[in-house]
Amino acid sequence: MDDPVSALLEDICQGLGPREGLYAADAVFDATVPGWRFQQHGQDAVRRQLGSWFDAPARFEELTRAPLPEGEVVTFTLTSTDDDGPYWTHQVHLLAVSDGRIVRQQAWCGGRWSAVRVAEMAAG
C-alpha cells in the first residue's frame, strides 16, 4: 500500500474499522486514554481495537497531517453519531510506517464527548 495513513483516515470516516493489510503482522498500538494506558499487539488486535473506536461513519472537523521520515503525526477532531447520539473526539496519532504498512501507532485520546459536554466546553 502506497499510503497506509491516508487509507486509515478513509477507514475511520467510513466507520468500518481498518481494512485488512493496513498493519504489519507484528504491529503495536500504544494508547493513552482518559485515566488509562494500554497496548495491543498484532494486526488483528489493533484492527479490533480501532474498529471498536471508529464504528460509525464520521467526519473530520479538524485534521492536521505532519510527515516524518518514518511515518506521520496526525491530529484530528472527529464527529459521528451512534445509538447514544452525536459525539466528538479529539486525538493525536503518531504512526510509524515500513514497507507500506503501519508498524507502530501511538494514540492520545481526550475522550468521547457528547453534545452536552461540547456545549459545556463552548460555554467555558
Image: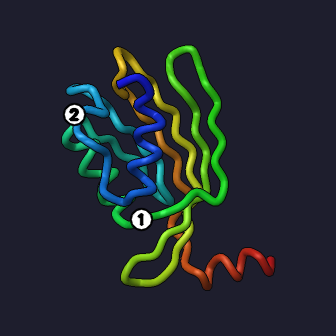
Judge left or right: residue 21 versus residue 50: left
Quarter of the figure with residue 101: top left
Q: Are marks 2 and 1 in contact (CB under 8 Å)?
A: no
- Tell me how far mark 2 sits from mark 1, CA to CA: 25 Å
Residue drawn at the location 22% of the way across and 43% of the way down: 45
Q: Quadrant of residue 83?
A: bottom left
In this figure, which residue is indicated by the disc labeled 1? Answer: 57
* Residue positioned 44% across, 47% down in the render: 10
**With 60 as the anchor, is 96 left or right in this view?**
left
What sort of colour scheme is used for the picture? Answer: rainbow
> Above or below — where is 88 with respect to 21?
below
Q: Position of residue 25 (x, y in %)?
A: 20, 27
* Amino acid type indicated by mark 2: Gly
Query: What residue is disc 2 on?
Result: 42
Quadrant in which the N terminus appears? top left
Tell which of 106 and 1 is nearer to you: 1
Rendering coords of residue 67 (x, y %): 61, 25
Label 2 residue SS:
loop
Provide residue 46's location: percent of width, then percent of height.
28, 42
Upstream in the sequence, badge 2 or badge 1? 2
The picture places residue 23, in percent across and down from the top left corner, at 29, 31
Amino acid type shown at disc 1: Pro
Q: Is residue 89 above or below residue 82?
A: above
Q: Quadrant of the C terminus?
A: bottom right
Check the image and report above or below for 85 versus 91: below
Q: How many marks?
A: 2
Crowd tier of the residue under label 2, counting other residues whose Cα lies within 10 Å: few below 14, some 14–19, many 20 or above? some
Q: Secondary structure at mark 1?
A: loop
